[in-house]
Amino acid sequence: MPAFDARCWVAVAAVCVPIPAHATQYLSIEQAQRLLFPQAERFVASPVRLSAELRSRIAAESGVTSRRDEQPVWKAMRGDAALGFLVLDEVIGKHELITYAVALETNGSVRGVEILDYRESRGGEVRDARWRAQFLGKRAGDTLRIDQDIQNLSGATLSSRHITDGVRRILALHKLVLSGR
Amino acid sequence: MSSKLVVALTAIVCSSPLQLYAQSVEQRIDRLQREIDRLKGEVSALRAPERGSEATSFFGYGEFNYNRFRDSERTSKADLRRFVFGFGHRFNDRLSFNSEVELEHAIASAEDSGEIELEQAYLDYRFSDAINAKGGLFLIPLGILNLTHEPPTYYGVERNEVETRIIPTTWRELGFGVHGLLGTQGLRYDVGVTTGFNAGKLDDPNTGIRSSHQEGAQADARDLSVYGALNYQRPGLLVGGGVFTGNTGQNGQADAALRGVNARLTLWDVHAKYLIAGWDLQALYAKGTLGDADRVNAVTSAAATPFAAPKSMKGWYGQAAYHVYRRGDLDIAPFARVERIDIQQQEDAALGVFQDPNNQERIRTFGVNFYVHPQVVVKADLQRYSTDHTKDRLNFGLGYMF
């Protein structure tokens, strides 16, 4: 009796033919800047040093601890007018880092979230625009909790939770530091 | 002054060498300012989070369970049910390795019932979002629980019985697969060729095909299987299904009685999960058939405890949970689940094997998941079995994942 139909192998081989493709990096920082602030003429680096004191204030405000000593931030400018801030951040998905950027309006509400790097083979659904759109307009003080005002993604539980926590932490950073810049 | 004179004077002043000089200095300062901003931006980008590609990660999950049976004849037990750890390694942006090692029941030795097993160990290569190839020992994408089975991700101390007795979670096979996203609307596929079951190893009358799984341990692989799964996801919703099919006779490698017997197994499922307004709703239906069950009876009727081979198996469950209290990391969610199991066996009076009444079962579970952290859960529930009352029990559990 034939143990296995050889035609199946052909089908599997056919879909495996390598095709030209991009790497795990979906967006460079510059691409994310242009995507989130298309009207901006320039981006002025405005990094925030995260002192131990500031870190503990952010943790108290958001319930999330920062691991870095410095948060990369850019101010999006058009002429002399500030359009908002772009904050670059990293969180751990299940066990790999996710690099993402949060764009904030000058009033501190979320203008957009873009995923720059996603390295895990599962859970990549956080790149889905419909999932990221849930953050639009959120501000410091909003709930921003998974399964509450941000819906979960089945199979991407940890990635979606950790990005949500990250955005909450960034909104606290805006409230405590960026709003004064 | 006439307006003509104003225009003339203005023209003279604005074109004076001094004015031109001042303008060009201003322009140069402005240019320099922009250049400095650009450089600062670049420096900041360079100091941005490291975007290196190579990394090794470590993770784990586990659970401690206590089962107290209502029937005093049944032994109530506390158990370190699972202690799982895993390594992942990313060689570069495209190639990665994943593994999970599980220790069941705390001690694995000749005198104890514990086991050490590899739940997953595979390599994954990303061509694109649409095409990823994997090879090694990996989880079969049927059902909800088989792929996502960390204790904080499901309700109840014990895993549901449909995805234990019909879909044999945690179910993994050796093989090769291709998976990825179809388009950008949340549709994911997974197809592949793997080892399959081995009917010659069936030895449990109440778990359908489960006892003939091979788990990548010198698996008889004369007969291979194929699988395919499709899942659609958008925030709050998951709908999907999968199918797995292959012969299980393995040309009699495990039991000569199956030489030349196909004993084809086909198992499929459909499932859905919906989160809305504090509710977690989940349902699943699974069905399987085993061909040549009359021939497989030669194996099962000769088992230590003879039984009739399964010829068809199906089950479904519906589950609802509601988050009654959430504050910060704390989350309390009571739930209820109803399950039906129906495993039909191939009776054979001559061999003295018949249908086991416990293979038609209805299980009702009521309990609560209490999350002290999104990744750490305390569970308690009550289970009622409609057919085999001796399994009625109270369960307590503690689970974690990181």
Image (tube, grey):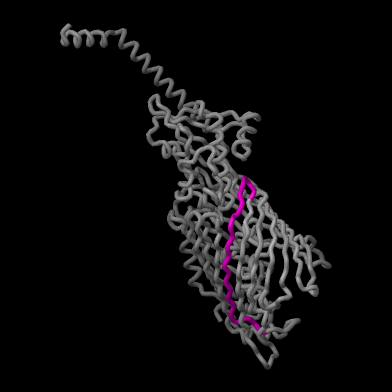
Q: Nearer the viewer, residue A51 or A146?
A: A146
Q: Is residue B220 visible?
A: no
Which residue is drawn at the image coordinates 60% and 45% (left, top)? Answer: A92
Magenta span has B319? yes
What secondary structure is the stretch in magenta mostly built from? strand
Q: Nearer the viewer, residue A30 or A86?
A: A86
Magenta span has B109? no
What percent of the width, then of the height, locates residue A94?
A: 60, 50
Residue B217 position (above or below residue B127): below
Quarter of the picture containing the N terminus of chain B is top left
Q: Nearer the viewer, residue B262 or A73?
A: A73
Residue A172 position (above or below residue B359): above
Report the label total.
0
Which residue is the extreme one toward the bottom?
B350
What percent of the width, then of the height, locates residue B351?
A: 69, 90
Which residue is the extreme one toward the right?
B111
Residue A9 position (above or below residue A28): below
Which residue is drawn at the image coordinates 65% and 51% (left, top)? Answer: B375
Residue B270 position (above or below residue B34): below
Which residue is the extreme one toward the top?
B1
What percent of the width, then of the height, locates residue B83?
A: 73, 57
Q: Which region is colored magenta? A: B308-330
Which residue is drawn at the image coordinates 47% and 37% (left, top)? Answer: A109
Q: Nearer the viewer, residue A53 or A36?
A: A53
Q: Is residue B372 visible?
A: yes
Residue B30 falls in image quadrant = top left
What percent of the width, then of the height, locates residue A49?
A: 59, 28
